[in-house]
Amino acid sequence: MTANSKYETQEHDVLIIGAGGAGLRAAIEALAQGAKVAVVCKSLLGKAHTVMAEGGLAAAMANLDKADDWRTHFRDTMRGGKLVNNWRMAQLHAQEAPDRVRELEQWGALFDRTESGDILQRAFGGHTFRRLCHVGDRTGLEMIRTLQDRGVQMGFDVFMECTITKLLKDGDRVSGAFGYWRESGRFVTFKAKSIVIATGGIGKSWKITSNSWECTGDGMALAYEAGAELLDMEFVQFHPTGMVWPPGVQGILVTEAVRGEGGLLRNKNGERFMEKYDPKKMELSTRDVVARSIYTEVKEGRGTPHGGAYLDISHKPAEYVKRKLPSMYHQFKELADVDITKGPMEVGPTCHYMMGGIRVDAETGQSSVKGLFAAGEAAGGLHGANRLGGNSLSDLIVFGRRAGLAAAEHAKKTAAPSLDNAQIDEAERQVLAPFDRAEGENPYTIHHDLQDMMQRLVGIFRTDADLRQALVELEKLRERAKKMRVEGSRLFNPGWHLSRDLQCMLTVSEACTHAALARKESRGAHSRLDFPKSEDVWGQKNHVIVKKGDAMTLFEVPRTAMPAELAQIMAEDK
């Protein structure tokens, strides 16, 4: 029986998995090249995690600070990433971000304005100049709205509430993907010459996270299973300010824009504690520093009643706060019954962003597998050991565009692949396995234990003993997952969906733990209590993880030397 007659099959030149900023920007670019494009998303169109990005997108437009240019942005990004970034990605990002912002503006994005009508820019941690272009504190929402309108108008095919469970291959190249409709549980195959993975991050592997339910590391796990390499998986950013109270909202993001607009951090004694940890940059220090500072204050007994710190912007006029931070004002009022114009917010670190991801070529976003591309948070390299606020949104549009362009060009010169029935049958068997077991645990308890373990053992501070323990626990969790059971039918069955997501989370959690164990130093977001210093020798290499047989294998790759003109920029200090 051919694959086509067995299941619904959709055929396209370029298949994009993920409909956030990177996926939509890739789709727009591929369409512009004349490709037939499909966008598949696990959730609804417009509900991508990009909408949660509040503070702004970083681009050296120099609208407020005339001295700003791509060189300073490049240097800030490299320094923020503790120099293990892919320097070519950092260079392209800094050079191309302003044009990508202007494009959004042409497509109808409404930014806040200066008196003279330029796009307004605000200060953010780790950036030398004010360079975050923003729309109040809901920039990501405006970006998604703009890109979505543009893509729909240009005519991509959208497949919503569809989960991809396996990438299909034709020899050493990708040929398509296998998945199911979340509502009916019916299977679907996608045939494509090029695939772009833009599935975002892995935050749902941790208990306290700003990430929504979709962020289960699907894209990284799919790519890994298909033979692609993962890069820098030890670098997981804990955003310093998530809500800590009430428990139902724990982890929900409090944008860095609160600090960018003048918010102050204090401990329970009223001390402005950032003076101790980074007297120069204070609240606008990089995220890794602020997160560790709050964590240390709590650990040493100076935390707030619910185990966080106070973030206070109530010294600013109420109208100013409501105008600059409308979403934050409503979020605290509605969820925590706190008026942020009158008193402080209680905040603490929350698992937020993955700097690591699929290892890609800087120019094209192509992975080590032919025809497989990645962009956005699912791709590693740009941010090094720690991402600067605002760089994620500009990352999406700079590298989303590049991946879409390269994917369309690859599709043009590639013959249509064939789908292998054996792979499809195997994919179906894997997905249905939990229904076939007469007994076993449900996926919820396993997921709960995974989150608990990652929070405890692979959190903000790490040690050799904890990480080794985590690998032991992961092995046990994997064994439990092999026996998990799902009840009911395939019709809109959340337990079944989770059983699939859990496999992805176990893969990325293991990759993260292996890489964290191997990096015997502290750098950026990766902090080892047993190796508290950064060592030059570690700054010269990155960790790559790849599947060999059934085993996860880690190897080191030396960083390529930066060209002289970029090294010169790094040496300058304005």
Image (cartoon, rainbow, N blue to C red):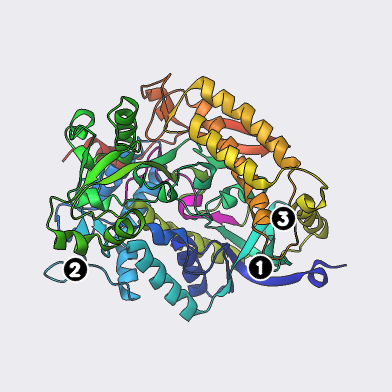
Quick one: 391 or 112, which is closer to the camera? 112
Q: Say whether residue 378 is magenta.
A: yes
Quarter of the rendering occupied by the C terminus: top left
Q: Helix or strand or loop: what does disc 2 sit on?
A: loop
- Which badge, 3 or 1, comes first in the chain's sequence? 3
Task: Report, in whole angstroms, how far the alpha carbon at label 2 lies from the one at label 3.
Answer: 48 Å
Question: Label 1: which residue?
Answer: 183
The region drawn magenta spans 372-389
Question: Label 3: which residue?
Answer: 169
- The answer to whether residue 157 is visible is yes
Q: Amino acid at mark 2?
A: Arg
Residue at x 21% of width, y 55% of height: 122
Q: In the drawing, does residue 338 fall left or right of residue 548?
A: left
- Which badge, 2 or 3, comes first in the chain's sequence? 2
Task: Report, in whole angstroms, how far the alpha carbon at label 1 lies from the one at label 2.
Answer: 43 Å
Q: Say whether residue 436 is magenta.
A: no
Give coordinates of residue 380: x percent, y percent: 48, 45
Give coordinates of residue 194: x percent, y percent: 61, 62
Binning the other alpha carbons within 10 Å of mark 2 as few (below 14), some (14 to 19) or many (20 upward) gives some
Give coordinates of residue 514: x percent, y percent: 56, 30
Q: Amino acid at mark 3?
A: Lys
Closer mark to the observer between disc 1 and disc 2: 1
Q: In the drawing, does residue 213 fall left or right of residue 116?
A: right
Residue at the limit of the structure toward the right, as seen here = 1
Closer mark to the observer between disc 2 and disc 3: 2
Binning the other alpha carbons within 10 Å of mark 1 as few (below 14), some (14 to 19) or many (20 upward) gives few
Q: Helix or strand or loop: what does disc 3 sit on?
A: strand
Compared with residue 562, is residue 342 higher up or lower down, i.e. above or below?
below
